[in-house]
Image (cartoon, helix red, strand yellow):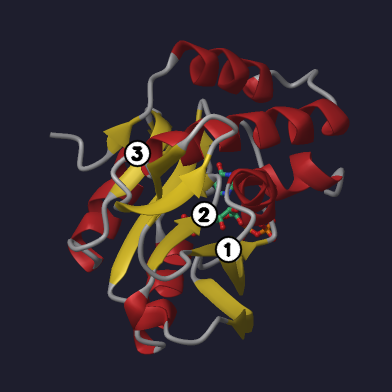
């Protein structure tokens, strides 16, 4: 039991390999992340409840399925979460969005919050938290804590790459929040980076250092 659902679709794995490659450009990295986000979104929403509505096709009336319940929320952990968020919003344009600004202190690896904004009625919505990287899990744990403080009860966490240490820590802190990832890597290095990993996701997305 890894404590996470691995989305091992061949297209996800192929695109992830290209993202890991150090020669992949910033532009290409962003494009691949957006494409993967569609595939991850498809998997993480496959059990959403539907209801029906009466429509008329050009031929006849029918009862057709539509999503049930209140609009879901994508909660993006800044900065790198926005790479997943943008693609997921293309699939579910009606979703609400929460932003949680967190950076990792490079010495302590603890998460430092600098921004938080979330929609209303969080307790009645499915909240899908997105961040490409789950390393120590300090950022994800802090983000989910903040969302719970705002009333969120039904959450899922989606990332691209996870370290076994991060999955364990996250599962212990938030056993009620399932984790979805495209891959589980070997471990963390002494600087808290996932190995083999893909480097610093935010820097690779935005061309910073
Ligand atoms: C990265 C990444 C996660 C966090 C993961 O963000 O996007 O949010 O590190 O590490 P953790 O699991 O050990 O907390 P970073 O803090 O580098 O900020 P950025 O997205 O603004 O670059
Ligand atoms: N954050 C990143 O962007 N990459 C890692 O490997 C770990 C944390």
Q: Counting residues from the N terminus, which is met first, the one under dot 2 or under dot 3?
A: 3
> Residue 151 location in percent, x, y?
35, 86
Q: Counting residues from the N terminus, which is met first, the one under dot 2 or under dot 1?
A: 1
Left or right of 19 on screen, residue 56 = left
Residue positioned 63% across, 53% down in the render: 85
Residue at which label 3 appears = 46
Residue at which label 2 appears = 130
Q: CA distance from mark 3 to mark 1?
A: 23 Å
Residue at which label 1 appears = 77
> Residue 75 location in percent, x, y?
53, 65
Badge 1 marks a residue whose secondary structure is strand
Question: Callout 2 environment at 10 Å: few (<14), some (14 to 19), or many (20+)?
Answer: many
> Residue 22 location in percent, x, y?
74, 21
Label 2 close to label 1 by CB (< 8 Å): yes
Q: Can residue 135 be seen?
A: no
- The image quadrant that residue 106 belongs to is bottom right
Asked whether mark 1 lies closer than 8 Å to ligand 1, one says: yes
Badge 3 marks a residue whose secondary structure is loop
Residue positioned 60% across, 43% down in the render: 91
Question: Callout 3 environment at 10 Å: few (<14), some (14 to 19), or many (20+)?
Answer: few
Q: CA distance from mark 2 to mark 1?
A: 6 Å
Residue at the far front in the pictured view: 60
The image quadrant where one finds the N terminus is top left
């Amino acid at each position: 039991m890894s404590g996470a659902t691995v989305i091992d679709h061949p297209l996800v794995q192929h695109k992830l390999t290209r993202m890991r490659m150090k020669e992949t450009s910033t532009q290409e990295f962003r494009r691949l992340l957006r494409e993967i986000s569609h595939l991850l979104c498809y998997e993480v929403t496959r059990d959403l409840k539907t209801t029906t509505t009466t429509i008329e096709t050009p031929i006849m009336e029918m009862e057709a399925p539509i999503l049930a319940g209140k609009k879901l929320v994508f909660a993006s952990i800044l900065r790198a979460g926005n790479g997943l968020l943008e693609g997921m919003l293309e699939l579910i344009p009606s979703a609400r969005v929460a932003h949680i600004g967190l950076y990792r202190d490079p010495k302590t690896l603890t998460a430092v919050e600098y921004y938080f904004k979330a929609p209303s009625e969080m307790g009645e919505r499915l909240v899908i938290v997105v961040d490409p990287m789950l390393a120590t899990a300090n950022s994800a744990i802090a983000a989910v804590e903040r969302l719970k403080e705002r009333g969120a009860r039904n959450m899922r966490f989606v990332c691209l790459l996870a370290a076994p240490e991060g999955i364990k820590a996250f599962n212990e802190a938030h056993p009620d929040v399932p984790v979805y990832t495209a891959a589980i890597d070997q471990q963390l290095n002494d600087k808290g980076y996932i190995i083999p990993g893909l480097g610093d996701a935010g820097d690779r997305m935005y061309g910073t250092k």
